[in-house]
Amino acid sequence: QVQLVESGGGLVQAGGSLRLSCAASVSIFRATWMAWFRQAPGKQREFVASISSGDSTNYADSVKGRFTISRDNAKNTVYLQMNSMKPEDTAVYYCRLQPPTGPGFWGQGTQVTVSS
């Protein structure tokens, strides 16, 4: 069973930065892609950013230019660097791993709160 453990969430003021980490219990080298999603209270879970096995990245329009996703295959960890944060970035952030075949896996989430 694949386990994903997110960390790095917390409380930050608007304009500040946080870096989230997602540590996987398996090698992420061959994962088709890994991604970050978020879910704000009363809203559906939404895509934030993804990174492919070839290191191609994709971002939601709302975070382009502010967030950066990266991966360290040696540490089986994916990161989300969040800069110039806004109150609307407040949400529970989830990590997802999509293997080449079969269903993907979710982490348990980490809370991010941005105060105005």
Image: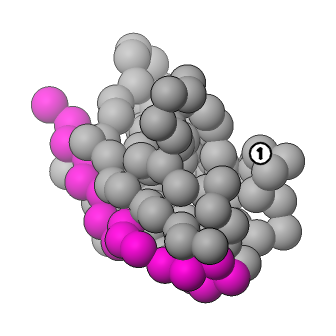
Image location (x, y in percent) of residue 104: 40, 25
Q: Quadrant of residue 83?
A: bottom right
With 91 as the anchor, is 104 left or right in this view? left
In the rendered image, the vertical position of residue 39 relative to residue 27, given as above or below: above
The residue located at (20%, 42%) in the rendering is 3
Q: Is residue 40 magenta?
A: no
The extreme left residue here reads 1
How many C-alpha atoms fall within 10 Å of the one at disc 1: few (<14), some, or many (≥20)?
A: few
Read off the magenta span.
1-17
Residue 52 seen in the current view: no
Relative to 96, 45 lies left or right:
right
Residue 47 in percent (x, y) is at 63, 37
Residue appearing at x 64%, y 46% in the figure: 48
User: Could you tell me residue 58's position as x and y percent?
Assistant: 76, 48
Q: Name the residue under label 1.
A: 60
Percent x, y for residue 46?
A: 61, 33
Circle 1 SS class: loop
Query: Which one is nearer the viewer's eye here, 20 or 88?
Result: 88
User: Seen in the image, is 93 located left or right of residue 1?
Assistant: right
- What is the quadrant of the C terminus in the image? bottom right
Q: Which of 111 and 53 is in front in this view?
A: 111
Write the residue at 34% across / 30% down. 105
Compared with 79, 3 (above or below) is: above
Residue nearest the viewer, comparing 60 with 3: 60
> As shown in the figure, which amino acid type bears the numbered disc 1?
Ala
